[in-house]
Image (tube, helix red, strand yellow):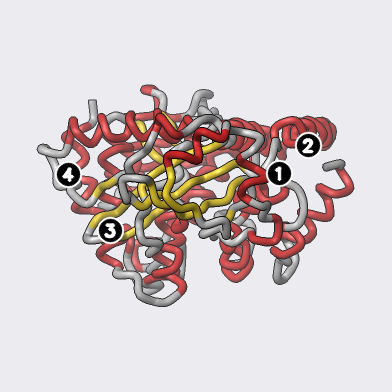
Amino acid sequence: MNFISFIFLIVNIFSKKPDISKIQKKWLLAVKIAQVFALRIDFLSRDSCMELSKLFSQNFHDNDLWFDEIVSNYIGNDWYNNFDFIDKIPLASASIWQVHKARLKNNEIVVIKIIKKDFTEKFIKDIRNIEKFLKFIIFFYPKLEKVANPLSVLESIKKTTISELNLLNEISNAEILNNVYEKYKDQIDISRFALPKYYKELSNENILVSEYIDWENFDRLLEEKKMNYNLLLAFFQIHGVFMFSEWIFHWDVHPGNLIYKNWKIYLIDNWAISEALRSTRAWLFEFFKNLVIYDYKKCADSLLKMSITKINNIEKFNKEFELLYKDFEWKNVSQVSLTKQMMDTIKTAVHNWATFNDDMYPIIKSLMYLDWMVIKCKPDADLIKDLKPFIKDFEKFIK
């Protein structure tokens, strides 16, 4: 990807209706950048965000490859002996991988996820090209780095995509998440949390064999208007326990990565876990704790304490913060989304010379997904009010 292609991508994303078919047919980096903008309701219209959010769905079948053609590059012939049947037509497909349903010799139904091809070299080259272009832009317009921090976002895309390209990370990360679950399951009800079973002995960096779970994901439930709002709140409780206890959490929790079956919420694509720095933990929780009781003065104080740098004119910041949250208490998610409010909050702080650690990005991004799903499921919801009981429960985990 060169800077001209990048500019055309941005023009497409910011158009009245983004053309996601063009994005899907282009480079891996284009899809990843567009997925980031799908959550930026502070930059784009809600309709544009909804259109771009379709890129989270597992429907990239235009560039599917023949199963045997891919697997032959990754595995020996003996590997096939473990299976009684493999469906060569993909069950699901994303920008990087495709999934096939199969049956083991012991009759267990599994899915085989395979990396479509070697994306790494081309992806890294594209990242470097765009990085150079952004540094050039920032040199002439340094304020861009503070407001949107595009280099940090690009670095996050690079880090997470490289992690996604090694499928063994899903197994090790799932083990980490399961350990957190075991530690806290008796302290708070997170019984709906579930992970698929992984078959490590049949997997490698490019092939992942895991339990087959009926494909009733949140994305489909939302599209078919079958999503229960209480199910979203149950997911937030699970996500909150991970985030506010050990501060280790699955941050790429878009609706395509959440599957609902038999009262359980399965987290899949577990390559994307993150950990918040200790310096961020207590003050971020304090921010949300005060937000749900509408104590905006204390929210502003918490934000200031999270900043790495000191704000000179605190009085000016407090006035802008107060204005930003005027009437916030009386609005539902369709009137003011939590995503937009959080992004405007960070923007206000940055304009007043605050700076934050990069670990804030995956935290906010994971909460953006919840907000986006609530907007689609129940646009008249008072999300802040509904989250209040959970915040009280999480307080006992703060260390």
Q: Which residue is mark 1?
A: 29
**Residue appearing at x 27%, y 47% in the figure:** 194
Between 265 and 127, the one lying in front of the other is 265
* Mark pair 3, 1: CA separation: 32 Å
Q: Which residue is mark 3?
A: 233
Identify the image quadrant of residue 221: bottom left
Residue 156 seen: no
For marks 3 and 4, give the one nearer the viewer.
3
* Mark pair 3, 4: CA separation: 13 Å
Mark 3 or mark 1, earlier in chain:
1
* Mark pair 4, 2: CA separation: 44 Å
Q: Which residue is mark 4?
A: 393
Q: Tell me the quarter of the image containing the N terminus.
A: top right
Mark 4 or mark 2, earlier in chain:
2
Q: Secondary structure at mark 1?
A: helix
- The reply to whether callout 2 and callout 1 are in contact (CB within 8 Å) is yes
For marks 3 and 2, give the one nearer the viewer.
2
The residue carrying pointer 4 sits among few (fewer than 14), some (14 to 19) or many (20 or more) residues within 10 Å by Cα, namely some
For marks 3 and 1, give the one nearer the viewer.
1
Q: Secondary structure at mark 4?
A: helix
Mark 2 or mark 1, earlier in chain:
1
Q: Is residue 272 left or right of residue 227?
A: right
